[in-house]
Image (tube, rainbow, N blue to C red):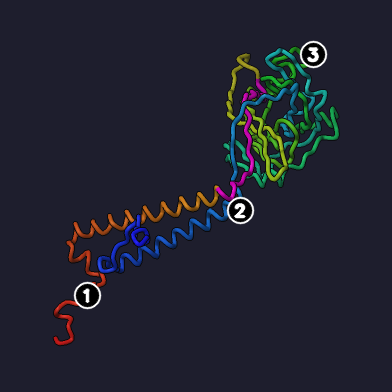
Amino acid sequence: MDTVRTFDAFPKINSQHSVRSTRGGLSTILTTFMGLLIFWVEVGGYIGGYIDHQFTLDNSIKQDIAINIDMMIAMPCEFLHTNVLDITDDRFLAGELLNFEGTNFFVPSTFNIDSEKEVVNVELNQVFAENMRAEYQVQGSRLNEGAPACHIFGSIPVNHVNGDFHITAKGYGYQDRNHVDLQSLNFSHVIAEFSYGEFFPFMNNPLDFTGRITNDHLQSYKYYTKIVPTHYEKLGLEVDTHQYALTEQHVTYKAREGIPGIFFKYDFEPIKLIIKEQRMSFIQFVARIGTILAGIMIVAGYFYRLYDRLLTILFGKRYASKDDEKKQGGILDSKQY
């Protein structure tokens, strides 16, 4: 029994073989500080949770999806055609549901004009703060169509297949009894809202608050959008939106070379992005804290020994040990001298 009591699987260093030093004290303080700092960060992460991003196959079946539009074009409404054409050759006269309101063209000072808009990742809390749904109450209204510019707004349902929504002038691209004079063409425009799916007016999209200004009559603006259904989840609340990636192409045609206008081409991706807030279990949290703190102690020990070895190599053993506390006094330390 006495043998068992004196047995130690982890033998300790005898006190007469350990040497205290200033470097050792500073390294202990620094290691303790780093451990407490990381512990504080981990506790905050455990309480606040973390945001998990997952991509999954979109297996939902949808027949149609809405395109939400609010934009202004520097041409009279009576000159414009608005249509949707998809890969099934299904053509939809968007002008029957959109609202056209004549106005004077102006450029808001807060819009990004002829420049790329900075893309900012939306925070989960911001999504739930801005998830107020809305819808346009009026459809198919036409007011003051002879004004110099046209304000187009509303929502139109389109088939859930790849296609494009385009705005052209009468007589260009489609046969029409009227033909707009070349000198009257001006597809300068500003976009206040362009989104897919349910209409969330406070959510920011890549084309929102942007604009393009031109002096060329045969100007074509093509916006290519890749749509990804996005599901947000937090504390049991859920919001489904449709984000999209954007690329642009601007072309100036010569006479009879192409169709001037504004084209929004949309492609649906077969994946779905799920963004949700999660929290780890308490057992996982304790195991994580223990692993991190043990790792800090091991790494700190390695760095201390490496630093001590470098001092010995560069300046000699005497310099490296000058701050060490003496184990016992020498002959010259005796009181009799």
Return the mark for residue 47.
Answer: 2
Give the camera-side residue of 108 and 39.
39
Q: Nearer the viewer, mark 3 or mark 1?
A: 1
- Residue 204, by quadrant, is top right
Give the camera-side residue of 293 and 76.
293
Circles 2 and 1: CB atoms closer than 8 Å: no
Lower sequence index among marks 2 and 1: 2
- Specify the amino acid type for callout 3: Arg
Would you name the residue on which mark 3 appears? 177
Q: Is residue 142 left or right of residue 40?
A: right
Q: Quadrant of the N terminus?
A: bottom left
Q: CA distance from mark 3 to mark 1?
A: 110 Å
Residue 209: image location, x then y, percent:
67, 39
Q: Is residue 268 magenta?
A: yes
With respect to residue 178, does 126 lie above or below?
Answer: below
Question: Tag 3: Cα neighbours inside 10 Å, few (<14), some, or many (≥20)?
Answer: few
Would you name the residue on which mark 1 appears? 328
- Specify the amino acid type for callout 1: Gln
Give the main secondary structure of the magenta stretch.
Answer: strand
- Specify the amino acid type for callout 2: Ile
Q: Quadrant of the C terminus?
A: bottom left
